[in-house]
Amino acid sequence: METVKTKDSAPGAATRPQRQRQSNELRKIFLKTGLIPSASGSSYLEFEPSPALAAARSTPKSLIPPSSALKLACTVHGPKPLPRSATFSPNLVLTTHVKYAPFAARKRKGHIRDASERDLGVHLETALRGVIVAERWPKSGLDITITIIEAEDDRWWGDAPDSHDAPWGMMNVLAGCITAASAAIADARIDCLDLVAGGVAAIVSDGDDAAPRLVLDCDPAEHWSILSACVVAYMPSRDEITELWLKGDGSKAVLSADDKRLGNEALLDGAVDAARGAHTVLAEAVRESAERYAGLALGGPAR
Amino acid sequence: MSAQRQASSASQTPHISPAELSYLWSSLALPNNPIRPDGRSPTQFRPLSAETDILPGTNGSARVGFADGTQAIVGVKAEVEKTVAAADVSSLSQRAQEQFGENQDGEGKSSATTTGHGSWVQMSIEIPGYRDDDALPVFLSEMMREPLVESVSSGGNADGEMAGGLKGRLVINRRWHWRLYIDVLLLSQPLSYPLPLLSLTTHLALLSTKLPKLKSLGEEDPFFDDDWDAAEYLYPRSQSRLASALQLRPPVTLLVISVGENVIFDPSRDEIAVADTLLAISVARDGGSDALKVLSIRTVDPPSRLTQPGMPNAENPASLESAAVAEQAVNGEEIPGVWRPRRGGVKRNTVAKMVKLVLQKGGVGEEVLEGLEGVEVG
Amino acid sequence: MVEGTLAKLAIPGQRLGSIASYSAGPGTHVQNANIYASIAGPIVIDPAQATAKTKSTISISRSIPQNAATKPVTTKSNPKYNTLPTVDSVVLARVTRVQKRQATVSILVVLDDSAATHPLNPSHTPSDNDNVAAILTSAANPENHSSSDELRFQALIRKEDVRVVEKDRVVMDEMFRVGDIVRGSVISLGDQSFYYLTTARNDLGVVMARSEAGNMMFPVSWKEMRDPDTGLAELRKVARPF
């Protein structure tokens, strides 16, 4: 592993994990559908641990792992009748529920959903509602529940909590939620316009003097500071975005010389590229789900 | 009901018939020349009245009323709080290095004192008819808090006081900081998506917020000048009127919709009901240049996705239309004049267009900020 | 051709063809004059009837046809876009409440077309109906009145929809009892909470019931069922068993 001399690499001190990937290279995604038999659709998603994390797991040097890798499970229940008190709806009523397991993040989460979890739920709902063909399922409801088993860090643990404290990890979590929910909905055979995939791009800076640059699928632990980040839920076949969440000031990004785009446009395009990458994994997982289902119905005689 | 509440926008769905929705959509989507129900131009805002410093018990406050009768009050309170010691590895190692007599520029050390923490700014929104843990208030407060704490002005000419943005301004010294409570009160049931109203009110309240003048020095326990007249503005202002344009100001969040090819600002409730896309864009002035910059963009779930579809004549047993239209209907094609709930998302160039209209010189963003600067503060 | 079409799987968002050459069936949607898949599953192309000038229908199957060759002759039925009960679909439901003017039932299974044509062979229906027997035996078990009713679609059988003849003489208590399994046909999507069912056909009505003593009864006439152990008869609106 090449060692890069940064301001943190003091003798004896823990070193910040370094990004080994190209700036446009994504982490590998593991995605599988149909793991929860009692749900009408389900999926499980996992991000590849960073090399630093993998190394720390095999030969631990510190009690604290250098970074974390996203793991989450998504279940879809329904279509089922709406609660008695609900009013008539000609469309499918979507309910999203995102919950961190208490042990998911470095800081323990309570059992009651906090503001950030509710916020994630609304983002996810926005992303999915644009994709589902809701008028095909009148009078019924669909519950989407996501449990985050291991969350993405917001920063490297060695940084002071005030160095870049915005919840950047949440954006990666949201992208994972979108991709996983999309797979689970397809697994439940709810009509969708397309498989919607989540992607993240960020403008990061690796030191006071380093120029801010654009990276796809950033691991917040690997960067000294994140200036701006963007999540999209993207439908490749229609080239449309159903959810966009951009925050931070990306106006200082240094793009290549012939790039005339604004920082926010470059971010958006980057996030879309990341989502395209996730879509290939998603398509494969859904195809697998369809094959498993077809095999079941053809091979196994009716019980 | 809870399922309906969950939706950030569902509660906003007005009861408009499919025929009205279709009519509204097509008049708003007229190429280059949308016709709005209230006759405004696409970038025109509704008139509003505003006043600041209305509550003596707060550090800063504002009231904004829209012409439709909805009003919001924002009160800002500040408390002094002890900073929980936050040792990070870099400063630890630096300290170690200093002990070893190694010479290193103290850049990292000094920066540690100017950065603050986002959680020092707390925002709560109260909307009648909603519990405070419902999705809408939570989403709105996150949406408004985000650009606020994020707005680190890295501009060259920013005077030292505001270098770390709002977060940096809250730092008193290494051990003490201000905690800011922003409480937003909507006085009536929202008639449209309340974001612009709340954002403008919060902006004005923060502008009028004053913190007592610090008398202690350096790392001492802080004590303050008890003369309120000597208090300093949270967002410092230069004395010369000339530089007023370059003054630091809190960000504002604008609500923008797209209908067909058109982009429309400050949409009313009915206009939101037919919007293809609904974006909340937060902008602030860049410290360095006079230009505006984006601090956050969020899509908001447009209620048009939950509307009731219209029924084409072909499917209507009460009418006797011929089979030509019927085939179209079977194929799921859009029939002009028949409302279909919106589905799908937004194209990238539409987003870019919306952002550009906000940011460009003399664009909507500047117009709004200039309008707000016209409000007499303090 | 059957094998070939079954082997081809589509995933949502995949382009299937243009509306110039096909018409869009269930499981697909139309965007910009192209047909796209909206669920994952095998592509089924239903060839147009030679006589009609209609185009072939392309659709994505939700329940894989077990034997497309013996597919029942599709008599102009509404294409089914979902697995929910729709008008005319035949359902099995359990009676949860009997009132003077109506009976409340909760829908256990929506029998799909192939099952509807062979009503006596529910075990041969594929996909989500494959455990009909399991659902029914558990549902008919009086100890199994669990809260899962909340998760099922509710329906009403109004007094006037019970039978064709002597509608005015219907006494609901003599037609249904709580716990009975009823085969009914959906006549309306109803209001926000209930579908409306009818049993006014010979093949519709109670298919399984337990006597007061708790034994499974067998049908003896269109309005009577009998307990094999006690020999006592009870009144029901009985579905024709064959």
Image (cartoon, helix red, strand yellow):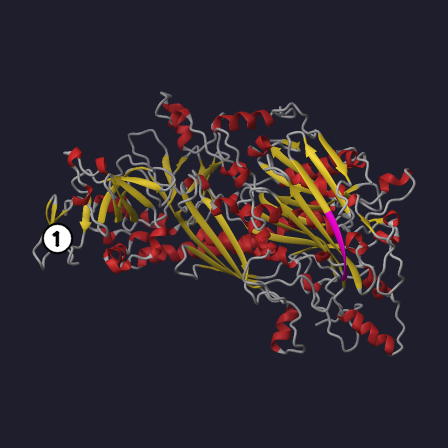
Q: Where does the image place residue C104, in percent across and percent down from the top left?
A: 28, 45
User: Badge 1 local density, few (<14 within 10 Å), some, or many (20+)?
Assistant: some
- In this rendering, is residue A251 above or below A19? above
Question: Position of B185 compared to B95: left or right?
Answer: left
Q: Position of residue C84 (x, y in %)?
A: 35, 44
Looking at the rendered structure, the secondary structure element under dot 1 is strand
Q: Position of residue B63 (x, y in %)?
A: 72, 38
Image quarter (top left, top right, bottom left or bottom right) of the C terminus of chain B: top right
Return the residue nearer the eye: C166 or C1: C166
Q: Is residue C238 magenta?
A: no
Q: Is residue B376 visible?
A: yes
Identify the amino acid type marked 1.
Phe
Numbered disc total: 1
Host chain of mark 1:
C
Q: Is residue B79 magenta?
A: yes
**Residue marked by disc 1:** C218
Query: On the rendered structure, is B248 left or right of A131?
Result: right
What is the magenta range?
B76-81
